Image: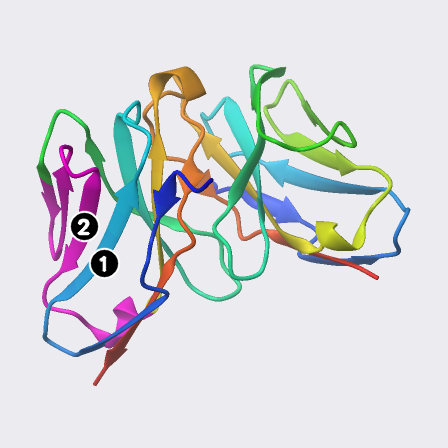
Amino acid sequence: DQQVKQNSPSLSVQEGRISILNCDYTNSMFDYFLWYKKYPAEGPTFLISISSIKDKNEDGRFTVFLNKSAKHLSLHIVPSQPGDSAVYFCAASYGASQGNLIFGKGTKLSVKP
Amino acid sequence: ETGVTQSPTHLIKTRGQQVTLRCSSQSGHNTVSWYQQALGQGPQFIFQYYREEENGRGNFPPRFSGLQFPNYSSELNVNALELDDSALYLCASSPAPPVGTEAFFGQGTRLTVV
């Protein structure tokens, strides 16, 4: 049973536009959420995170929104750039897990020039 | 500050054999976690080591085992390899405490079992 779900396997966006990547979770014990970006032949790279006590966290072009009642989070990239083309993983953890991350299957983002 | 490094980068083994994968954690990090990423899937947690002790384990059989050394580097050992063990194995290190902190990943070891 998947606790973290990314229901869109792929997303294509025009350069300069907004990219919105979505993630749903089922475990209400999760208290920390992270987004990772992965290029081919590389390990995942940490992008941005959010604690469950917040509903928004912003870092440059990247913003993560958390809706606890809906058990949903989203990553907004504005403006999108061709270099953002990668697979994006949503991950979650909770205190008892000692920080172990539970990942979604990922969404492949393609930003077209 | 050095990042997380894994060796080897690629490996081909025969079913039934044993394999050891290695990971050097980022400087200052005392927690190492191992993940298995099958094709088309997200990384799946195998286990974590904190100050040389196993500190949590995912849903993997006992033939997956590990070690952490005093310098916080780590090994993942897999015995009696099966075809389904073919995957990208990722090592991640975290600063103490491990809870609620970002994990920094290595580039992974691609294991193919034939």
Rendered image: mark on residue A79: none
Depicted B101 relative to depicted B107: above or below: above
Q: Where residue B77 sits in the image (x, y, percent)?
A: 76, 35
Instruction: Tell me: B55 left or right of A20.
Output: right
Q: Quadrant of residue B64?
A: top right
Using a 10 Å C-alpha cutoff, classify the residue at mark 2 as few (fewer than 14 neighbours), some (14 to 19) or many (20 or more).
Answer: some
Can you see residue B26?
A: no
Depicted B99 relative to depicted A22: above or below: above
Residues rendered magenta in the picture: A57-85
Q: Amino acid at mark 1?
A: Leu
Q: Chain of mark 2?
A: A
Instruction: Tell me: B77 left or right of A11.
Output: right
Dot 1 and dot 2 within a common chain: yes
Q: Classify the position of the N terminus of chain B by image quarter.
A: top left
Instruction: Tell me: B22 left or right of B42.
Output: right
Look at the image and say whether residue A34 sits in the magenta stretch: no
Circles 1 and 2, Cβ within 8 Å, touching? The answer is: yes
Q: Where residue B84 sits in the image (x, y, percent)?
A: 73, 52
Task: Give the residue number, with chain letter if any, for mark 1.
Answer: A21
Q: Where residue B8 sits in the image (x, y, percent)?
A: 71, 52
Q: Residue furthest bottom?
A: A113
